Image (cartoon, rainbow, N blue to C red):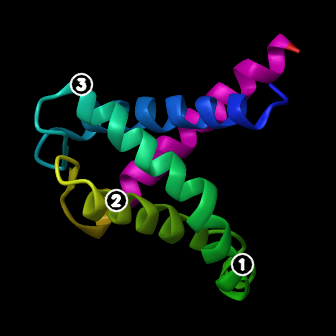
Amino acid sequence: MKSVRGRFVVRWFVSSFGLWIAAELLGNETISFGDRFSAVIISGLILALLNSFIRPLVVFLTLPAVLITLGIFMLVINALMVMLAANLYGPLEVDGFGAAIMVGIIIGLVNWLVSILLEDEK
């Protein structure tokens, strides 16, 4: 997918799917959406927007920490993006920073798997 719109739709899908998988794996006490599927889609949209616009700036500003930790600080950045999405959208609830790190890891794994599948189609 070479168009910007197409890449954003894939990012939105991956974010929504990753949030849903995280909710299933971690349980409703860790991450919840208010039992609405539309909340998963909207949460994924908010997270995709944050990852498109805010995350690159945060990565740039924290580049020394990312380099010193050999990229492990990216887990913290992913968790911050999940927590910011939860603060911006009420139905998305994340139970603390540790849960946000786990959600970020799960979304990262889903993103990795989807990118492998999409590269195989080329």
Q: Is residue 105 magenta?
A: yes
Instruction: Choose the circle earlier in sequence order: 2 or 1.
Output: 1
Q: Please state which amino acid type lies under the numbered disc 1.
A: Phe
| Residue stretch rendered in magenta on the structure | 101-121
Q: Is residue 3 magenta?
A: no
Residue at horizontal 67 percent and vertical 84 percent from the top: 61
Cβ–Cβ under 8 Å for marks 2 and 1: no
Magenta span: helix, strand or loop, mainly? helix
Horizontal and vertical percent position of residue 74 = 59, 67
Q: Nearer the viewer, mark 2 or mark 1?
A: 1
> Compared to 109, does 46 lie above or below?
below
Horizontal and vertical percent position of residue 102 = 38, 53
> Compared to 64, does 31 lie above or below?
above
Disc 2 versus disc 1: distance between alpha carbons?
21 Å
Q: Please state which amino acid type lies under the numbered disc 2.
A: Ala
Horizontal and vertical percent position of residue 6 = 70, 28
Question: Is 61 on the left or on the right of 99, as rendered?
Answer: right
Query: Tag on residue 37?
Result: 3
Closer to the camera, 114 or 37? Answer: 37
Disc 3 versus disc 1: distance between alpha carbons?
34 Å
Residue at horizontal 68 percent and vertical 77 percent from the top: 66
Q: Nearer the viewer, mark 3 or mark 2?
A: 3
Circle 1 packing at 10 Å, graded few (<14), some (14-19), many (20+), is few
Question: Is 121 on the left or on the right of 33, as rendered?
Answer: right
SS of the residue at dot 1?
helix
Q: Report how many numbered discs are placed on residues in the image.
A: 3
Residue that numbered label 2 is attached to: 100
Residue at horizontal 82 percent and vertical 23 percent from the top: 119
Residue that numbered label 1 is attached to: 60
Cβ–Cβ under 8 Å for marks 3 and 1: no
